[in-house]
Amino acid sequence: MEVEPASKPKFRIPVDSDNQATEFWLFSFVRPHMSAFHLSWFSFFCCFVSTFAAPPLLPLIRDTLGLTAKDIGNAGIASVSGAVFARLAMGTACDLVGPRLSSAAIILLTTPAVYCSAIINGPTSFLLVRFFTGFSLASFVSTQFWMSSMFSPPKVGLANGVAGGWGNLGGGAVQLLMPLVFEAVKKIGSTPFTAWRVAFFIPGVMQTFSAIAVLAFGQDMPDGNYRKLHKAGDMHKDSFANVLRHAVTNYRAWILALTYGYCFGVELAVDNIVAQYFYDRFDVNLHTAGLIAASFGMANIISRPGGGLMSDWLSDRFGMRGRLWGLWIVQTVGGVLCVVLGLVDYSFAASVAVMMLFSFFVQAACGLTFGIVPFVSRRSLGLISGMTGGGGNVGAVLTQVIFFRGAKYKTETGIVYMGIMIIACTLPLTLIYFPQWGGMFVGPKPGATAEEYYSQEWTEQERQKGYNASTARFAENSVREGGPRSGSGSQSRHTVPVDASPANV
């Protein structure tokens, strides 16, 4: 009897029933899962570099253009405000046309603004280039959507955390990059007036090539690009109205948007003020101020991924309730450290030390947030990711308008008030409740299932046509969110006992 050889696996990386990767090979570029990971974080990294290329050179730009404190504050607000609406649009675009085209489009559309930074001549043009460059931060939404589509529930927190964290790393790397480029151009023979302008071509070129790479080597889903899947009938082509309705009517999305405003939003605000704060408050030179500011952003290399990894670990131990408790604890501690940072303004060493601790907690909270977001909705995953990401930008805008615009508050006082806001705006996490998994203080509803929760987003007619097939598979693969004692029978019917949460262990 002849034995037929085993068929060759479709993917080199292990996958679940929905072809989402069940392992995370950090240093691999295997297609499509790990190549999507590297393309997403690097393109987002380049956008972060472009958006925050100005702050490290702000003392020079300020003197050249004659900017006032109000001009600088307005430009900082502009740099993060435009992305509020861009992120909402990006989320919808991901749901409808896929993350590959959406990401490449926003990056290419904002690249001209980066190059135009070299020719600004006053407060108005400075504000405009920062405003339009900031739209590129919407690529964060495509990054998180992409990872949530490529990796299975047990790995989605880690994948989102590393991709987002390494992308955010651009906010720290640019604090080192721009002063180095400026010095290099000046040594060639340029005047300071010309050198800082030439320096802006570096982030412009980086952003351009990252978009080309996404288009050339990216793939929307494990099974192919949206266009191919729609054409073959393997994927339902949804409508904007349905995507919007299921996103805005899910209260969990609004709470996560609020809380994300005071982790990622705070990170954006600090990126805009930290170099100038240390430069002015402690009279350090531009290079030292840049190094300090860089250390805040560079912490993302471990902090945000650490938050994502912690979210997955807590899920393994306590289910979704563990993810919620972890986010609340970490973000609240971050708020306390922010208050302390504003109070130790008398000591340079203490300020740097507390800032580093603060950076770890506030960035880890970002990773923990996107360990929860993929479970809120599957039909409107992109828009809910956009709402959450947009909430981060809203938080940054409000924080800078209230505390760091003009001379109403000293910077150190604004930092204290910002910490209090973090603590207060994290409290609504206690209201998030999943019927099938429970909330922070309340256990799951008896008999509730993940399959029923996600099926509510589809009509009976749509379910009969099989449009919800991918969400049904996701429900099966998210059994672990019920906690360690979840049912071992039907993977979509699972519960977690009331005592299986960190609060009762």
Image: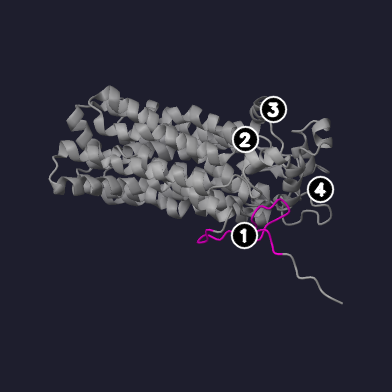
Q: Which numbered disc, 1 or 3, marks the residue that appears first in the sequence?
A: 1
Q: Which numbered disc, 1 or 2, marks the residue that appears first in the sequence?
A: 1
Asked if the residues shown at circle 2 and circle 4 are in contact, with their CB atoms under 8 angstroms apart, the answer is no
Indicate the position of residue 184 as horizontal and vertical percent values: 20, 49
Q: Which numbered disc, 4 or 3, marks the residue that appears first in the sequence?
A: 3
Q: Residue at x 43, y 50 (%)?
A: 300
- Residue sticking out furthest to the front: 2
Element at badge 2?
helix
Asked if the residues shown at circle 2 and circle 3 are in contact, with their CB atoms under 8 angstroms apart, the answer is no
The residue under label 2 is 95
Answer left or right for 420 relative to 350.
Answer: right
Q: Which numbered disc, 2 or 4, marks the residue that appears first in the sequence?
A: 2
Q: Which numbered disc, 2 or 3, marks the residue that appears first in the sequence?
A: 2
- In front of the other: 365 or 230: 230
Answer left or right for 133 relative to 264.
Answer: left
The residue under label 1 is 23
The residue under label 4 is 493
Residues in magenta?
A: 8-29
- In front of the other: 1 or 188: 1
Element at badge 4?
loop
Marks 4 and 3, Cα distance to the nearest angstrom? 26 Å
Q: Is residue 334 magenta?
A: no
Tell me the kind of residue under disc 1: Glu
Element at badge 1?
loop
Q: Residue at x 53, y 43 (%)?
A: 143
Secondary structure mainly formed by the magenta segment:
loop
The residue under label 3 is 242
Q: Nearer the viewer, mark 4 or mark 3?
A: 3
Q: Which numbered disc, 4 or 1, marks the residue that appears first in the sequence?
A: 1
Q: Is residue 14 magenta?
A: yes
Tell me the kind of residue under disc 2: Asp
